[in-house]
Amino acid sequence: MFKQIFPLSTIIGLRFFGLFIVLPVLSVYALELKGGTPFLAGIVVGGYALTQALFQVPFGAMSDKFGRKKTLLIGTVVFIIGSIICALSDSIYMLMIGRFIQGAGAVGAVVSAMISDLVKEEQRAHAMAIMGGTIALSFAVAMVLAPLIGGNYGIDKLFWLTAILGILSIFILFTKVPNPPSIIHTYSEAESKFKDVFSDKALNSMYITFLFHSSVMTMAFFIIPLVMTADAVHGGFGWSKAELWKVYLPAMLFGIVSMGPAAIFGEKYGKGKQVFMISITSIMLAFFAMGFSNTPLVFVIGVVLFFIGFNMFEPLLQSFVSKFARVHQKGAALGVANTFAYIGIFLGGIIAGYIIHHYDRATLAIFVVMLCIFWFLWILKMNNPNARANVYLPLDNYKRDDIMKLQEHEAIVEVYINETEHLAIVKYEKEMIDEKGVKELLK
């Protein structure tokens, strides 16, 4: 499994590294450009997410129909073009256009869908954890390099670096990533309509979670560099941009460590809902500390708590969506989930910029605490994604027609064929039947 997933994880890690490496210093940089204001800086920070939101679903659906690799290539080329425009920007508006084009290469859902194609559902949490760990590692490296490169050589060099990494991703895609298996399902055109990805309440709960998770991330990355680099007169602590790695590195290390227990308790022990609730509580405490701290130490503790809460979600979010979605919906469902995530990023940037422009960080903290309370209550209603399981049936041992007839049983969620591995996959409700019972139905 690792051999299949690592190249894809590397691609998504490089992609996120390109996005993360500008986040720690972007709000400060945007304010220094011609025409920069806190509100416009907020649009720049979250701007790429608006076009990500617009193109996630089309790219996800396109990958279902025309193939994952072709879709990944198109999205990566668009991202490279946007990065080059950002690197050449000399005004806030040109930077904004570059960020919008960067976001139009929306392939996050395509990579997640491809991973779910290549590995069995029982291994998917491990696969997503590998991807999440790669993203977290790119996050940690970006947090250290961004202040050092941006502070000493200029922010434009960061955007040139993202363009180069995009080119490297294309090379990895066509030399190291295996082709996904050929899947056969029995869903009709009527059953495969896009609107059906909104008919599942469990999926809808996950979409809202993606929205909130991403919005608080943007708000955090908006205020952290502003507060740390502002002088005492403006409510900051007077650090230089090149020193910000001292805040981000320890916070990210704590965040990476928190991912392991989150994945184990969320997947192995079926405690995903409880993991989410702990994560939300950590994020709420983080913003309270960042919003009302008077010393750098308390503020940094708040940053650490934020990274812990934020990263605990990472190994579970994509995995849970792919579990709830049916086989013919994975690309589209993950596209919708990522759309909600990027809408959250965009809204987070806009809201943070507006509140900081008109009020202060304490007001932003109160807003996030109220949001977290609502989010916590929303999670209480979420279904348990571990209530379903799969049985894998070798086609040499069973008749296809008999396997397909299983779909008529009320305990069977879906049945589909993996032609590449010559397997039939049967998803069932664990409270109604077990693996032995599924096999008994075929006798």
Image (tube, rainbow, N blue to C red):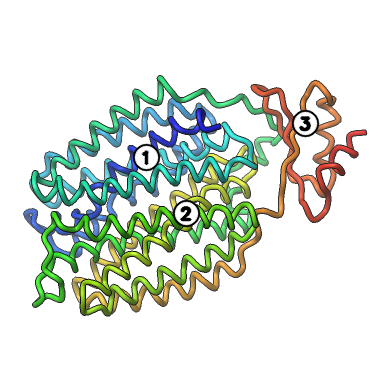
Q: Is residue 357 left or right of residue 154?
A: right
Residue nearest the observer in this picture, 370 or 190: 370
CA separation, marks 3 and 2?
33 Å
| Helix, strand or loop at mark 3 | strand
Of callouts 1 and 2, the N-terminal one:
1
Percent coordinates x, y for residue 101 in the rendering:
27, 41
**Of the residues shown, which amino acid type is indicated by label 3?**
Leu
Q: Residues within 10 Å of mark 2 (few under 14, many from 20)?
A: many
Which residue corresponds to mark 2? 259
Of callouts 3 and 2, the N-terminal one:
2
Tell me: residue 116, above or below residue 337. Answer: above
**Of the residues shown, which amino acid type is indicated by label 1?**
Gly
Residue nearest the observer in this picture, 348 or 125: 125
Which residue corresponds to mark 3? 393
| Helix, strand or loop at mark 2 | helix
Res. 173 mark: none
Q: Is residue 255 left or right of residue 190?
A: left
Q: Residues within 10 Å of mark 3 (few under 14, many from 20)?
A: some
Q: Residues within 10 Å of mark 1 (few under 14, many from 20)?
A: many
Res. 13 mark: 1
